Image (cartoon, rainbow, N blue to C red):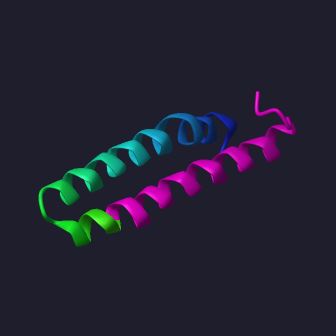
């Protein structure tokens, strides 16, 4: 993966997908589908959070920039 792809994953794709899954989890909980809502909140949202952090760390290691710029 190159720097541009990792930047897109870390700063755009994973945060948006994490937000969407968190909202969907809350909607599922409010519409009495509690089990699937909790799975969305606990599992899927965390997957996108850790995916974004992984991409950020990988990008930093490729660029050698500790600040992430």
Q: Position of residue 3 (x, y in %)?
A: 68, 37
Query: Is residue 4 positioned above or below 28 on the image?
Result: above
24 with respect to 49 (left or right): left
Q: Is residue 63 magenta?
A: yes
Q: Which residue ends up furthest to the bottom in the rendered image? A: 35
Q: Residue furthest left?
A: 31
Give the main secondary structure, helix, strand or loop, of the magenta stretch.
helix
For the magenta stretch, what is the residue range?
A: 40-69
- Look at 59% across and 41% down and name the residue there: 10
Residue 5, image x and y in percent?
A: 58, 39
- Comparing 16 with 7, the one in front is 16
* For residue 63, side relative to residue 10 (left or right): right
- The residue that appears at 78% across and 42% down in the rendered structure is 60
Check residue 22 for magenta coloring: no
Q: Residue at x 67, y 41 (%)?
A: 2
Q: Can you tell which quarter of the image residue 11 is in?
A: top right
Left or right: 21, with 52 as reference point: left
Quarter assignment of residue 44: bottom left
Q: Nearer the viewer, residue 2 or 21?
A: 21
Q: Nearer the viewer, residue 20 or 5?
A: 20
Q: For residue 29, what is the image quadrant?
A: bottom left
């Amino acid at each position: 993966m190159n720097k541009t792809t990792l930047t897109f994953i870390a700063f755009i794709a994973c945060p948006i997908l994490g937000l969407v899954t968190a909202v969907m989890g809350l909607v599922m909980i409010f519409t009495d589908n509690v089990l699937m809502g909790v799975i969305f909140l606990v599992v899927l949202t965390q997957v996108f959070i850790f995916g974004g952090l992984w991409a950020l760390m990988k990008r930093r290691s490729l660029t050698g920039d500790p600040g992430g710029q």
